[in-house]
Amino acid sequence: MPFSAAAEAVTEPDLNWIEGSGQKVKLTDIAELTLPQNYFFLDKDDTIAFIESFEDLPSYDEIGYVEPADEDAIWSVYFEYAESGHIEDNEKSDIDADELLKSYERGQEEANKQLPEYNQLYVDGWFQEPAYDESMRSLTWALLLHDNDGNQLINYNVRVLTRVGYISAILVSTPDNLEADRITFSQELLPGLSVTPGNTYTDFDPSTDKKSSMGLTGLILGGAGLAVAKKTGLIAIIALIAKKFWIILLAPLLWIGKLFKKKGRKGQAAEGGNSGTTPDSDPNPVMNTDHLPPAENQEENRFRTKFEAENDPNKPPTTM
């Protein structure tokens, strides 16, 4: 289906868009975000509904979503939270970017042997080497890849450590615009992210709180220690299950949200209010599966079949 026709075919759900005015909005009880003017926000439940409306599969770790009001700005940020246990940052001065990159390369090479050609990826290098910001207790890195068609892929990752887990800020952009969008995100949104009292990194209580076995290196490698990842190729799994980190591999329907008239956000925000209050929920977790190897259950196959059918290049154009 042509992209424009697909956009016409999708109806955006009725969501409570919160319009920014410099107020704080809740990312569940874990964190708060100062929402500047010219941005719109969705809470946890509405973020999940937004993703599902495009027949994409949420991780159900989502705790919020932000997009700029500018109709020409095609980028957005997803916030997720994982209760992994407390991650110590004692590796902050010992992150070996070169060895990590070699591990990604080896892992992806092994994965490619077991993947269909259309799912194979190739690691080109760091777009931004891993760096730790001690003042914010955050870890940032970006990896540059390409697929079999030569399309450039970039992931951009920010992890903010908390008392017993970490917040992920996932920037969704395009390779051509990523650097400019990253700067805007870093200057206008990220400084307004704060972990709530009682949940901060320094609130960790070793006598009562769970402690994670992974450090900063493990966090970069998706939970696997460097030595284990080098032997088993676990790095490749990251590219398959963390689909929102891979910009080009996003299901195209996710971008349809950008084609809805953003002036409609203002009307919805005015009707729904912009207090920033966000209800919490406890849904059952579901793994992202869009770009995994062949699906192992009927639900995965249903989504995969529908996606492939709607994006078949030989399919006649749909007129609306």
Image (cartoon, rainbow, N blue to C red):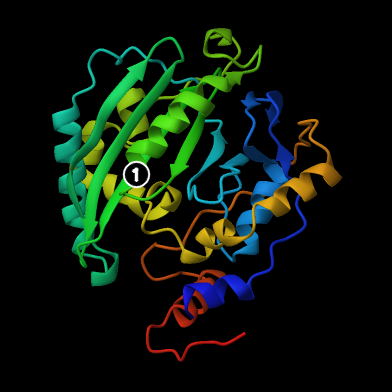
Can you give x and y, in whole percent of width and height, for residue 279 in the image?
A: 78, 37
Name the residue nearer the viewer: 213 or 118: 118
* Residue sitting at x 65%, y 47%: 47
Q: Is residue 298 visible?
A: no
Q: Provide residue 314's location: percent of width, then percent of height.
A: 38, 89
Type of amino acid under label 1: Asn
Q: Is residue 20 visible?
A: yes
> In the visual, does 193 lie left or right of 235?
right
Q: Secondary structure at mark 1?
A: strand
**Where does label 1 land, which residue?**
155
Count of all numbered marks drawn on residues in the image = 1
Q: Residue 167, relative to residue 42: is it above or below?
A: above
Give whichever of 299, 158 is nearer the camera. Answer: 158
Mark 1 burial class by Cα count in 10 Å: few <14, some 14-19, many 20+ = many
> Picture quarter containing residue 230?
top left
Seen in the image, is 301 located left or right of residue 33? Answer: left
In the rendering, at what x and y percent does residue 290 appear?
45, 63
**What residue lies at 20% left-to-right and 66% top-to-bottom?**
148
Residue name at image x 34 percent, y 18 percent:
132
Answer above or below: position of 4 versus 143.
Answer: below
134 sits to left or right of 44:
left
